[in-house]
């Protein structure tokens, strides 16, 4: 056998001893302890961190409206007026619709089994597909989950009464960010000693915030438009729970490229089971056309003026955020993910003009 670096002349395997210094051991132990402390701090403070993240996103969204009102009235008055209007509208919308949602969910629980049974009893390919998907079981589980989370209006008011101080604190923090946030950002930028790097960071943050706001506004606008349209169609067809169907379609429509088609499927299934197959095909065809227009035309415009966001990013962030801290974390997590993508997209764009103006190296 030929000798190798790991063997001696007689063919015996040579052993090596690795000595770890005391400093290395102490450093490794310190790193592990630091990670454990950071993990514990994050777990203990994730609720507060979530509040801070929500307030930051809200301040970024409300800032253009406050700036517009600030042209005619003092900025503090504009901030307070904006929050009074938004707060009253939010309370009226949330607590005013809980009873309606509760009634509609219970109506769906009564009607949906009949509709799904009709679909599964069909003798064609559609019936076979519905049986393979176990549509009845999935719909029952989904409606039970929705019923547990919606509840009645009085129950929602009682459960959320203790969270009123939390919302008040969040409102104060958001107002603070609206008034002093720009100064805080300018103060942070002043800590960057290099002028070129300071201008680069400022340009990237400003442009990324603008583009992320445009993208999120387009996503929310699309969801509202599709939700209202589906709710109106369901109401015209006398389907049960048009508000719930519109809400499901609107939330799903915020998912780029595929959300419109996914969100309209419950309406298509109920229409096919309770009304007629032709109406269901017409709704599905209209959703496919709208989805194609959104993916091929509207999405290009949004990507040009905002930031390109794929459905996988939104879906992954929503699932992780919902698992960690509920629907609020899912929504604000998407906002931060869009902003992060905007920053990544703007860094090379902001560097190009600076590289062109930089003097050539001899």
Image (spheres, rainbow, N blue to C red):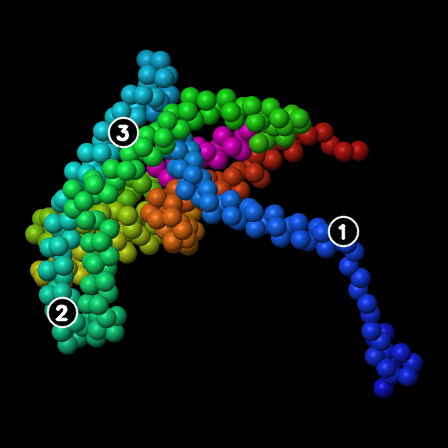
Q: What label does residue 86 carry, if any?
A: 3
Please say whether residue 27 is one of the residues in the magenta stretch: no
Residue under the point 46% across and 33% down: 209
* Residue 201 on image: x %, y %: 57, 32
Q: Which residues are magenta?
A: 202-217
Which residue occupies 46% across, 42% down? 45
Which label number is shown at residue 117? 2
Q: Position of residue 202 (x, y in %)?
A: 55, 29
Q: Is residue 355 above or below residue 6?
A: above
**Residues marked 2 and 3 touching at CB (< 8 Å):** no
Would you say the residues marked 1 and 2 are in contact, meaning their CB atoms lie under 8 Å apart? Answer: no
Residue at x-position 28% and y-position 44%: 223
Give the alpha-carbon distance from disc 2 to disc 3, as whole Å: 43 Å
Image disc number at residue 278: none
**Local crowd size for mark 3, using a 10 Å CA cut-off: few (<14), some (14–19), many (≥20):** few
3 and 1 marks in contact (CB < 8 Å): no
Vertical relation: 341 (above or below) 357: below
Frontmost of labels 1 and 2 is 1
Q: How many marks?
A: 3
146 relative position to 319: left or right: left
Q: Nearer the viewer, mark 3 or mark 1?
A: 1
Determine the CA span between mark 3 and mark 1: 57 Å
Foreground label between 2 and 3: 3
Residue under the image location 77 percent in, 54 percent down: 22
Compare marks 1 and 2 and give the one earlier in the sequence.
1
Neighbourhood count class around disc 2 (C-alpha, 10 Å): few under 14, some 14–19, many 20 upward:
some
Q: Which mark is residue 23?
A: 1
Disc 1 secondary structure class = helix
Residue 310 visible somewhere in the drawing: no
């Amino acid at each position: 056998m030929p000798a190798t670096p790991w063997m001696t002349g007689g063919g015996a395997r040579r052993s090596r001893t690795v000595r770890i210094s005391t400093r290395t051991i102490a450093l490794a132990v310190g790193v592990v302890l630091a990670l454990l402390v950071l993990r514990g701090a994050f777990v203990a403070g994730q609720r507060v961190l979530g509040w801070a993240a929500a307030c930051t996103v809200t301040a970024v969204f409300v800032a253009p409206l406050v700036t517009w009102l600030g042209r005619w009235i003092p900025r503090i008055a504009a901030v307070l007026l904006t929050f009074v209007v938004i707060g009253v509208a939010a309370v009226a919308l949330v607590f005013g619709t809980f009873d309606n949602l509760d009634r509609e969910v219970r109506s769906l629980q009564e009607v949906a089994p009949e509709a799904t049974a009709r679909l599964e009893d069909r003798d064609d390919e559609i019936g076979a597909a519905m049986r393979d998907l176990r549509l009845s079981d999935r719909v029952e589980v989904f409606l039970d989950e929705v019923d547990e989370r919606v509840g009645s209006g009085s129950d929602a008011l009682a459960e959320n009464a203790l969270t009123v101080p939390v919302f008040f604190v969040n409102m104060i923090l958001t107002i603070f960010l609206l008034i002093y946030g720009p100064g805080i950002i300018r103060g942070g930028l002043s800590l960057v000693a290099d002028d070129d790097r300071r201008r680069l960071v400022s340009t990237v943050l400003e442009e990324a915030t603008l583009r992320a706001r445009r993208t999120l506004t387009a996503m929310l606008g699309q969801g509202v438009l599709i939700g209202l349209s589906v709710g109106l169609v369901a109401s015209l067809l006398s389907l049960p729970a048009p508000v719930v169907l519109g809400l499901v379609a609107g939330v799903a429509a915020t998912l780029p490229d595929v959300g419109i088609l996914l969100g309209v499927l419950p309406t298509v299934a109920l229409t096919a089971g309770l009304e007629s197959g032709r109406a269901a095909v017409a709704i599905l065809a209209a959703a496919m056309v709208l989805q194609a227009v959104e993916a091929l035309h509207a999405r290009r415009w949004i990507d040009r003026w905002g930031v390109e966001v794929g459905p996988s990013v939104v879906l992954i962030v929503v699932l992780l955020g919902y698992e960690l801290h509920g629907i609020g974390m899912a929504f604000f997590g998407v906002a931060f993910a869009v902003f992060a993508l905007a920053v990544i997209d703007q860094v090379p764009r902001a560097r190009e003009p600076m590289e062109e103006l930089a003097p050539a190296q001899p």
